[in-house]
Image (tube, grey):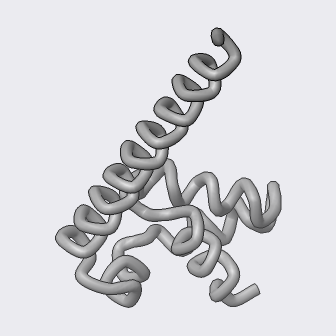
Amino acid sequence: MFGGMAGFIAVGIAIAACVAGDRATKKRKREFRDRYGSFEGFRGQVDTERIQGVRRQSGDVAAIKAVREEHPCVSLVTAKRYVDELPV
């Protein structure tokens, strides 16, 4: 009896986490769109020299982290795209 109840509770928690995650993703996308308008608008607001310096010293992962720290509403995918497109 308790095994079925525990499974039911686990499913409920998983669904709640998915809903919360989806809301957070939508909020982040809305904030990005409102703040930057597009990827090009975002790119124009990043301190490129600082991010390139972080990339040279510490690598891509650190540069992506620096982008996200400077611009919290930017998704991991967008930050990675930005770093990947930086000139070497």
Q: Quadrant of residue 33?
A: bottom left
Task: State the residue at coordinates (76%, 66%).
Answer: 60
Task: State the residue at coordinates (31%, 62%).
Answer: 26
Task: State the residue at coordinates (75%, 59%).
Answer: 61
Q: Quadrant of residue 64?
A: bottom right
Q: Is residue 41 left or right of residue 85?
A: left
Q: Position of residue 48 (x, y in %)?
A: 53, 74
Q: Is residue 1 left or right of residue 88?
A: left
In front: 49, or 85?
85
In front: 45, or 26?
26
Above or below — where is 50 with respect to 88? above
Residue at the far left in the pictured view: 34
Q: Quadrant of residue 62?
A: bottom right
| Quadrant of the rendering where the C terminus is positioned | bottom right
| Quadrant of the rendering where the N terminus is positioned | top right
Residue at the far top in the pictured view: 2
Task: State the residue at coordinates (56%, 69%).
Answer: 79
Q: Position of residue 50 (x, y in %)?
A: 57, 63
Q: Count every numbered label the image shows and give the total.
A: 0
In front: 3, or 9?
3
Residue at the far front in the pictured view: 1
Q: Position of residue 75 (x, y in %)?
A: 49, 63
